[in-house]
Image: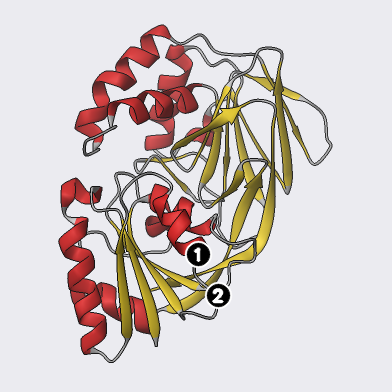
Amino acid sequence: MRIHVVANPTAGRGRARALAQAVGAALVARGASVTVHLTTAPGDAQAYVGALSPTSGDRIVAVGGDGTLHEIVNAFPAPFPLAVSVVPLGTANLVARDAHVPLGADVETYARIALEGVPWKVDLLATDAGRSLANVGIGLDAEVVRAVARARKGGVGGYARWLGPIAKTFLEYAPPALEVCVDGGPVVRGGAVVVQSTRNYGGLFTLASDARMDDGRLEVTVLRRASRRNFFLMLLRAYAGRLDRDHGVAILRGTAVTVRSAVAAPVQTDGDPSGTTPVGVRVLPGALTLLRPAP
């Protein structure tokens, strides 16, 4: 079996470099032919995978966070031609959590998943800017993502490093007036929107408890009044798994979403800045094969 290991060496507070080499060695010991590529800058994972022939390997092992996965799935048109295994070393690890890939496992566990994992056909989310695996956010969370992106330039990430930029953004942000339309239905107005495929949000919260990566639909959470207080209360209820009791939140479901605003609002995809509104999101059912642990 031919496997490409693609790693962001800054992920996991710099642990990804050694872990990628160790996983590669474990795969070689199990008889695989392995190439290890350490990325050098944002966009490098996408460029490296995009330069591969779909027939040059059987699997890709992504060592890093959701951002590394995001780059990889944008390297080829959908459906993605190679199965992907995850070694989660990001901050939130949304995809790994939904795929039940253990965080902080040993090298042999990740090598075994890469070689013997159960193929799982999952959906991708398509926007004009590309494809994502986990979510598309419009409004406050996208502005937070912008602030975090500026803070982590040239350094490692992690929640502790992000607290300052997040707090500053919360204090200064003015929510936009967003108009949300799902599958051509009536317009729902709000100040923040999250379109999801994953159940987990931010590594700590559950916005849409029915979200599944393989059900061919999108879960759309609209915060009707996105003041700092309401956003904070929404996260508290999401942390407790009780967002369905928040009457200030609308949870919609469908296969295509458009979000517009009179004043351009920031957009994030999988934790990276991705332009501004207007934005359209549609589901691409079963467009990626993830490898997850056997039950």
Q: Distance of mark 2 from mark 1, alpha carbons?
A: 9 Å
Q: x, y percentage for residue 49?
A: 46, 63
* Quadrant in which the C terminus is drawn: bottom left
Residue type (three-letter) at the residue carrying disc 1:
Ala
Q: Secondary structure at mark 2?
A: loop
Q: Which residue is found at the position 55% from the left and 54% from the top?
A: 74
Q: Nearer the viewer, residue 66 or 102?
A: 66
Which quarter of the rendering shows the N terminus?
Answer: bottom left
Q: In screen coordinates, is 238 left or right of 278?
A: left
Q: Quadrant of residue 36?
A: bottom left
> In the image, is residue 31 above or below residue 185?
below
Instruction: Measuring from the top left, give residue 45's x and y in whole percent.
Output: 41, 55
Where residue 180 appears, x then y in whole percent?
71, 28
Q: Position of residue 278 (x, y in %)?
A: 70, 27
Q: Is residue 216 visible?
A: no
Judging by the rendered image, the residue that carries numbered circle 2 is 54
Q: Is residue 62 left or right of residue 249?
A: left
Residue 170, picture quadrant: top left
219 over 187 or under it: above or below: below
Residue at the spot 38% in from the left edge and 37% down from the top edge: 240
Say the numbered circle drawn on residue 51: 1
Q: How many marks?
A: 2
* 291, above or below 16, in the image: below
- Residue nearer the viewer, 38 or 200: 38
| Residue type at tag 2 | Pro
